């Protein structure tokens, strides 16, 4: 699949945009389809600033979405890194990302379900245990707190969790 075709997928594009922003996507769109290139060659071919090229390549490399091969010039001893993209791995990376997000959301869901919340209009919400010791006053500014109904928050969390689980094929 060509880079242009991969980038047409909305979920993949969104994922990559969050990772490498506009300048990174710009590099991918201009990236030569064939061959392997050094960062300097890529900057020259795409007209994108060398530091930005390097930053994008490194960010992709961390997610295993780009690879390099190291060449040593036998005369000068200089090293050259030749880069190739591994955008075929993006769908797997998107899945990993969703799994991590799901874990966080489920932990939050548990916290919201297991606690009763109290709101200070200035400082935000606190749990029952935090305000009880102070006879239902804010632990930070000592104003009286009010019970906070987290039903709407919890149901929004549940909707997001179920949408992600569906995406991952869990239900
Ligand atoms: Zn307060």
Image (cartoon, grey):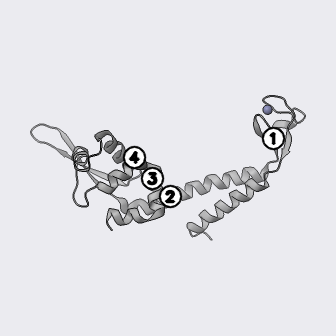
What percent of the width, then of the height, locates residue 4?
Answer: 34, 63
Residue at horizontal 45%, vertical 52%? 17
Mark 4 to mark 1: distance in Å?
A: 40 Å
Question: Which residue is denoted by mark 2 in the rendering?
Answer: 96
Q: Which mark is residue 45?
A: none
Q: Which mark is residue 119?
A: 1
Q: Disc 3 on helix, strand or loop?
A: helix
Would you say the residues marked 3 and 1 are in contact, meaning their CB atoms lie under 8 Å apart?
no
Residue at horizontal 47%, vertical 63%? 10
Tally of numbered tags = 4
Mark 4 to mark 2: distance in Å?
A: 16 Å
Q: Is 18 left, or right, of 30 in this rendering?
A: right
Would you say the residues marked 2 and 1 are in contact, meaning their CB atoms lie under 8 Å apart?
no
Residue at horizontal 41%, vertical 49%? 22
Mark 2 to mark 1: distance in Å?
A: 35 Å
Would you say the residues marked 4 and 2 are in contact, meaning their CB atoms lie under 8 Å apart?
no
Q: Which mark is residue 59?
A: 4
Q: Disc 2 on helix, strand or loop?
A: helix
Would you say the residues marked 4 and 1 are in contact, meaning their CB atoms lie under 8 Å apart?
no
Q: Disc 4 on helix, strand or loop?
A: helix
Q: Indicate which disc, 3 or 2, sits on the residue closer to the N terminus.
A: 3
Q: Is 63 left, or right, of 142 in this rendering?
A: left
Circle 3 or circle 2, nearest the eye? 3
Q: Indicate which disc, 4 or 2, sits on the residue closer to the N terminus.
A: 4
Q: Indicate which disc, 4 or 3, sits on the residue closer to the N terminus.
A: 3
Question: Which residue is denoted by mark 3 in the rendering?
Answer: 17
Q: Indicate which disc, 3 or 1, sits on the residue closer to the N terminus.
A: 3
Q: Indicate which disc, 2 or 1, sits on the residue closer to the N terminus.
A: 2
Rate crowding at label 1 as few (under 14), some (14 to 19) or many (20 or more) other CA atoms within 10 Å: many
């Amino acid at each position: 699949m060509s880079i242009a075709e991969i980038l047409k997928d909305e979920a993949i594009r969104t994922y990559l945009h969050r990772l490498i922003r506009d300048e990174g996507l710009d590099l991918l769109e201009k990236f030569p389809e064939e061959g392997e290139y050094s960062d300097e060659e890529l900057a020259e071919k795409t007209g994108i600033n060398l530091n930005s090229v390097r930053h994008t390549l490194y960010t992709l490399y961390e997610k295993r979405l780009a690879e390099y091969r190291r060449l040593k010039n036998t005369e000068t001893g200089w090293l050259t890194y030749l880069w190739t993209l591994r955008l075929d791995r993006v769908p797997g990376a998107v899945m990993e990302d969703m799994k991590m997000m799901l874990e966080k959301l489920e932990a939050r869901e548990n916290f919201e379900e297991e606690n009763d919340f109290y709101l200070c209009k200035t400082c935000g919400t606190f749990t029952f245990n935090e305000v009880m010791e102070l006879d239902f006053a804010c632990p930070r500014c000592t104003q009286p707190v009010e019970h906070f109904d987290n039903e709407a928050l919890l149901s929004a969390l549940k909707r997001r969790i179920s949408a992600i689980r569906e995406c991952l094929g869990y239900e």
